[in-house]
Each structure stands twice: as C-alpha cells, then as structure tokens.
Image (cartoon, rainbow, N blue to C red):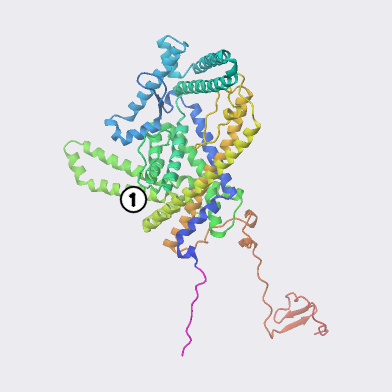
Amino acid sequence: MADESQTTVRGINWRETFPFTQIFRAFRVAIHPTKLILGLVALLSLYMGGRVLDAIWPISSNAVVVYKTPAGGGEVTDVETEIGIYERYLKEDRAGGRPFSEIRERGRRQVEAQYMRTLGELEIEKDVKKQEEFAKSGAKYSDVKAKLLERKAKQVEAAAKARDERIKAAPAEKQAEERKEAERAYARTVDDINKAVAREAKVANSIKGDGIFIQFFEYETGQINNVVQAVLANDWLGGFANNPVARGEGRVGVLAAIKNFTVTGPWWLITQHTTYFILFAILFSVVWAVFGGAIARIAAVHVAREEKISLSSALRFSTGKFLSFAFAPIIPLLIVLVVGLVVSVGGLIGNIPWIGPVLMGLFFFLALAAGFVMTLVLLGTAGGFNLMYPTIAVEGSDSFDAISRSFSYVYARPWRMLFYTLVAVVYGALCFLFVQFFLRIMLTLTHGFVGWGMMKNVDSATPLDLWDRMWPAPTTRFSYDIDTLNLHGDQALGAYMIAFWVYLAVGLLGAFAISFYFSANTIIYYLMRREVDATELDDVYLEQTDEDFGDAAPGTVPPAATTPPPAAPPATGTTTVVTSTGTHPAGDPNSPPPPADPQQTTPPPAGG
C-alpha cells in the first residue's frame, strides 16, 4: 500500500496571498523621521510662500469674508468665506446664470458698507466720501481697534462700579454671600464684553479680506478632515447634512470631499484669482518636486529593500531629477491645451461665409477625434497622477516614462488601481486619525500642566486667565486666534512665540499626511508594476554608494559592501613547477607562488 502523503499548513504569507495588504506597510514607512522632516519642510515652505503672497496682494483683491447680521441689527450670527460662497454658488446651479465675479463684488461692497458704518458709529470719520475711501483701502483699522479698546475699558469700569455698589448695598449678614455672587456676575459681564469687542474687531478687520492662500489652505485641510470623518461614518456618497460650508467645515461624503479637494478648491483659485494661482502653482511645483521627490525616493528604497537612504542622498536624487518631477504632471495638461487650441483654430473655419459651416460639418469627425484624445489624456492624468512621482523615484527615469507607465497601469488594470486607492484612503484616514489623536493628547497635557503653574491674570481690571489668553485650551480645532485685544507687550510676544511652537507641532500632522501620501502610492506603484509588468517588488533603481545608506535594517548588507567570494582552490592533480622564485602552477612560471601552508612540515625539494 502506497504511503499517504500529508500536507501541513504551517502559515500563510498574507502579502503574497492578498497583495493589497502590502499597503498596510505605509504607516511604518511614512512615520520614518527623515520623511517627516522633509514633509514638514515642504509644508512650511508652502505656508510661508503663501503668506508672503498674501502680504503683497492688494486688499481689494483678497478673498472676501462676509459677516452676516440680523435685518434689525444686533449680534453677528454667521460668517461666510468667498470659497464657501463659491461652493454654494456651484451647488445652486450657478446662481441663476449670474457670473460669480458679480456675486463676489456684491460681497465686497457689503463688507465695505459695514466698515463705513463702524467708522461712523465710533466717530472716527463722519464724512461719507472719506468713509468710502477708507473702506476701499482698509485704512483706519488701528483707530477702530483703539476706539473699541477705549469702549471696552469704560464698560468694564462700569461693570466694576455696579459690582462694588451691589456689595456695598447688601446687608451685613449676607455680605459674604453677596460678594461671591457679585464677583461671579462681574466675571460673566466682563467675559461678554470681551467677546463682543473681539467680535466687533473681527467684523471690522474683514475689510482687509482673508489672504487667498489662507482661505484656500483652510478649505483644503477642512476637506481632508471631511474625508477622515466620512470614512469613520462609512459615508461615501454624502449622507451628512447639507449645511452651508464655512471655512471648509461643512461635512460631506468621502467622494464629495475628494472632489472638493481636487476640483472645487483649485478651480476657485484658477478662475477667481488666476494670477495668484499661477504664482502659487510655480511655488508648489518647485517645493513638491524637491521635497516630494525626496520623500518618494526614500519610500521607494525603503519599500523595496528595507533600507533607508540618507537625507542628503534623497535630496541629491530629487534635485537631479527636478525637471522630471516638476513636468511629469504638467506635460499631459499641456498636451490637452495644445490639442484644444488646435480644435479652436479649426473652429475659425465656421466663420467663413457660405462654405464655412459645410466644411465644419464635413471635418467634424476630426474635432471628435481630438476630444477623444483629450479625454484619454485627462482621465489618464487623473487616474495615474499618484503614480508619476513613484515611477521616477523607483525607476530613476524621466517625465515621459512616468506618464507612459502611469497611463499604462491605470488603463491596463483600472479596477485594481481603484481598489488599491480605496484601501489606501481608508487605511490612511485611520492612521491620520491616530496621529491627530496623539497630537491632541500631547497638546492637552502640555496646556494643562503648564497652566497649573501660571496663575496670573491679564491685568487687574479684567479677571482673565493669562495662560488661556496666550494659548486657548486645545479643542476640536488645532488653530486659534491670539487675543491681541487683551494681551499687551511681553504677553503678546510670548503668545506669538508659543503659537510658533504649537503650530510647528501641529505641522507634524500635515507632514505625516504628505509622507503617507507618497509612501502609500509608492507601494501601489510596486503592486501595479508587478501586476502589469511582472516585475518583482524588490526591483528598484540604485545609484547610491554604501555610505549613503544611513540606517539599513539589521542583517542587510548594501550591494556595494558585499565581500567577494574567495578564489577557488586548485583542482586535484594540478601540476606545479618549482623555480628559483618558488612553486608555480604548471605552464605559468611567471605567476606568483601560492601562499605557504602553515600545516606543511616538509620543505620542498631544493633545485627542482
């Protein structure tokens, strides 16, 4: 009877059985300090560059911020940013056919009218023509702030006087109880006064508008948060309430948030602030090519060989491939633009009397063919954009190879590419939430423990905790406004310095998002390449020497450091020739003698 063979399954290689699980390596790859440093530098470069552009931009051309008040006057109830108005404009079928520029101009006039009323109410300027002049240039805001502070001091003084009179009028037996109640009422009144003054100052400050970059940046980061929240709610098509979007906080589904991030925000910048967009796009391309390319390069080697190349080596690679990184996503758009211009020129034929419409009808199939080409290029760019940088980083190639491979992989396996992308989005949202949670705990603990040691108030007139004014307790939002109305001199300077360190720590969240983006898409590139080209995952272009690898994984040896194997010993029976210079292999009397054998006890015969 034949022996029955038994097979025992001792384990499953999940990464080989389910290739998409390779994407779960992205967190470990992205959290590497070198990539985080590069991501943070990239984020700071974009932020500072955007701030510089905002500073030099004319106030009248800044993004509009509209504060709404009830019809009969009173407290401000809502605030809308220009980009929020633009998004609502798109949802409302383009506001009945009116151009958005008209809506934007109306918002600007509304802000100017509000500022003119403020100048009159505070008795800073009563002449209407001068009010209009100041409103257009944003002048006299420092006077507005000074008047508001003066009003605040009088209101606080009146509240203190009312408190003292209340305590004085209380019976002797209820003096202590009445004092506590009067102090609490005074504190509430002062808090209301401070909030009202801060609100009025904010409304008046809207005459300067929002920096275009700040509005765009806050909107885009808001959409990232929307993606995270929607993934947790398993809301892909948009089941959240359709509330108006203010500063990017209106929550929508995953797909809608991605559409807002990639289309709505950039398209607002392109169409409404074209010159600004061109300048910022140049800045973005430079920063993304240098630092994004370096992150992609480190991720490429890390994923393929579990080796982490040095920061200098990564930057040397990205700067050497700068034009390739910069033009890879631009070339397809230029192709679409050129083809579109050719079609537009062809459309001029229709202006020829009599024969023009006939010729257009006859050769219209060429326009359709051009439209087909433009559609292919646009869809290929949209689907393969995330693979372009990894292509250059992995293959060490150029822009055209990046475009060719990304298009090829997307069109060859579109559903697999979509599946990998969705897995990366879900996993990335969870990782982002974890890092966000970590930072929030860190900031809360820091704020709490430092606050225990700071028991000083802002000044003797207002019972405001100095620490909470210098740095408000972290809430659901990491960003906050510094209370410049209540802080003075060294307090304000200290608050700005604290804000620098806080925002630098918060910037690590953005740095992680950038690092994860390149790490996850590099893994997806490897998976798609293996699926389409049957290339192994560890195949990566290397040009570094062994000293460029800063902290290789234990047990790995860079290729350049591999020790060559020892020479094979002579075959058995090899004839040797003994000459005056020693013993040599037969047929080669000039070759050097073999090393002496330490085990040999009998000397070779003399004279040969």
The part of the image, by quadrant, that contains residue 89 is top left
The kind of secondary structure the magenta stretch mainly shows is loop
Please tell me whether residue 372 is drawn above or below residue 75 in the rendered image: below
Residue at the extreme bottom:
1
Three-letter code, disc 1? Leu
Dot 1: element: helix
Front-most of 268 and 32? 32
Question: Is residue 161 within the magenta segment?
Answer: no
Residue 239 in view of the camera: yes
Residue at the extreme left:
354
Does residue 407 appear to the left or right of 14 in the view shown? Answer: left
Q: Position of residue 345 (x, y in %)?
A: 29, 39
Q: Position of residue 274 (x, y in %)?
A: 40, 33
The residue under the point 25% across, 38% down is 348
Residue identifier under label 1: 376
Does residue 423 appear to the left or right of 176 in the view shown? Answer: left
Q: Position of residue 238 (x, y in %)?
A: 35, 44
Please tell me whether residue 86 is drawn above or below residue 175 in the rendered image: below
Please tell me whether residue 127 is drawn above or below residue 573 in the rendered image: above
The residue under the point 53% across, 52% down is 27
Q: Could you tell me how many numbered marks the image carries?
A: 1
Residue 485 in view of the camera: no
Please tell me whether residue 344 is drawn above or below residue 175 in the rendered image: below
Residue at the extreme front:
173
Q: Which residues are magenta?
A: 1-11
Front-most of 286 and 323? 286
- How many residues crowd mark 1 within 10 Å: few (<14), some (14–19), many (20+)? some
Q: Position of residue 374 (x, y in %)?
A: 33, 47
The residue under the point 60% across, 36% down is 448
Does residue 290 appear to the left or right of 85 in the view shown? Answer: right
Front-most of 305 and 392? 305
Q: What quarter of the picture does the C terminus occupy?
A: bottom right
